[in-house]
């Protein structure tokens, strides 16, 4: 265990250094969520009469900002496998595989590193939205960010596993990622409430772990820390992390074959 922790720290530091040398990549990653907040948020506010659940808890931002934070995590961590594809092309991954580092640490360290820009972007988004009427509940917000981190580790691990599986066909990585990403996002109620959708969409959402995370983030950022939604969100994030790490570590162990 000590070796795994030490090696994970080494991989985490190696992956983090390029980002610290180029912090503008984190700032650039804020463009998409801020565009959604600026252009999609007012549309939600304008349709509040038809979309009752959006404003049931008060300001439309109280409903939409947690969605944007989760969307940032979803897009960011699901694409991290592309970094590994680049390492396959340059031979950097093969060089890492011949080092004495624990193979599991190669995945865990990379996945944990992805939480650093995610945390930074989330804090900046919340800071930007507070002057516009978003009410911050610190305890719930911290737990919400923790759930995002757990979920992000799992999804990032699955992204790395996908990259390893299709490493000889880069286009296949983006095809699978994009094919899965948008249905999961729409069927989570992230952008529009599913309460007003057809029954089959609500049934499909019940099997989507992202839907439970959306409800949990909204509950936590509204200060409802001890709610049932928060509990189910924690279960969904934990299961995603467990499945992602299991699949990802197995893929990493076999990547040297």
Image (cartoon, helix red, strand yellow):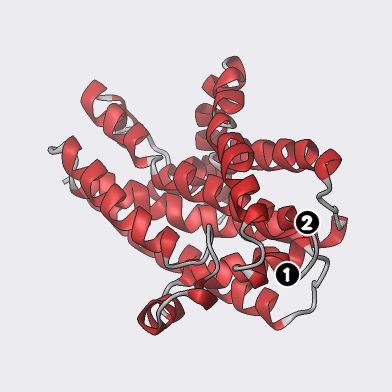
Residue 138 shown left or right of residue 143 in the figure: right
In the rendered view, tell whether residue 118 sits above or below residue 28.
Answer: below
Query: Percent x, y for residue 89?
Result: 22, 25
Q: Residue at x 26, y 53 (%)?
A: 179
Query: Percent x, y for residue 74?
Result: 48, 50
Locate residue 123: give its quadrant.
top right
User: Which of the marked residues, 1 or 2, is nearer the chain's N terminus?
Assistant: 2
Point out which mark residue 78 bears.
Answer: none
Q: Dividing the image into 4 quarters, which one contains the N terminus? A: bottom right
Residue 111 shown left or right of residue 86 in the figure: right
Q: Can the viewer see residue 252?
A: no
Residue 113 shown left or right of residue 230 in the figure: left
The residue where tag 1 is placed is 219
**Residue sitting nearer the eye, 93 or 136:** 136
Query: Percent x, y for residue 41?
Result: 63, 47
In the rendered view, tell whether residue 61 sits above or below residue 197.
Answer: above
Locate residue 220: give its quadrant.
bottom right
The residue where tag 2 is placed is 141
Closer to the camera: disc 1 or disc 2?
A: 1
Query: Percent x, y for residue 117?
Result: 60, 35
Q: Residue at x 70, y 39 (%)?
A: 125
Q: CA distance from mark 1 to mark 2?
A: 10 Å
**Residue sitting nearer the eye, 145 or 47:** 47
Q: How many marks?
A: 2
In the rendered view, tell whether residue 207 sits above or below residue 47.
Answer: below
Q: Can the viewer see residue 29?
A: yes
Q: Residue at x 81, y 50 (%)?
A: 134
């Amino acid at each position: 265990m000590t070796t795994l922790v030490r090696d994970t720290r080494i991989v985490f530091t190696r992956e983090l250094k390029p980002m610290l040398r180029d912090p503008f990549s984190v700032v650039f990653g804020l463009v998409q969520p801020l565009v959604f907040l600026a252009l999609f948020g007012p549309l939600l506010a304008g349709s509040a009469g038809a979309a009752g659940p959006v404003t049931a808890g008060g300001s439309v931002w109280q409903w939409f900002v947690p969605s944007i934070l989760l969307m940032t995590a979803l897009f960011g961590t699901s694409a991290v496998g592309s970094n590994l594809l680049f390492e396959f092309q340059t031979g950097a991954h093969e060089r890492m595989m011949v080092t004495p580092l624990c193979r599991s640490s190669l995945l865990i360290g990379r996945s944990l590193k992805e939480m650093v820009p995610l945390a930074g972007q989330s804090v900046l988004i919340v800071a930007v939205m507070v002057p516009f009427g978003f009410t911050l509940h610190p305890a719930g917000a911290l737990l919400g960010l923790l759930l995002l981190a757990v979920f992000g580790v799992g999804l990032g691990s699955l992204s790395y596993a996908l990259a390893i599986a299709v490493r000889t066909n880069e286009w296949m990585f983006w095809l699978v990622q994009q094919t899965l990403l948008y249905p999961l996002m729409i069927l989570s109620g992230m952008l529009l409430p599913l309460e007003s959708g057809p029954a089959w969409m609500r049934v499909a959402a019940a099997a989507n772990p992202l839907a439970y995370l959306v409800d949990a983030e909204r509950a936590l950022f509204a200060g409802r820390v001890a709610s049932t939604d928060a509990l189910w969100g924690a279960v969904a994030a934990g299961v995603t992390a467990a499945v992602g790490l299991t699949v990802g570590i197995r893929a990493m162990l076999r990547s040297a074959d």
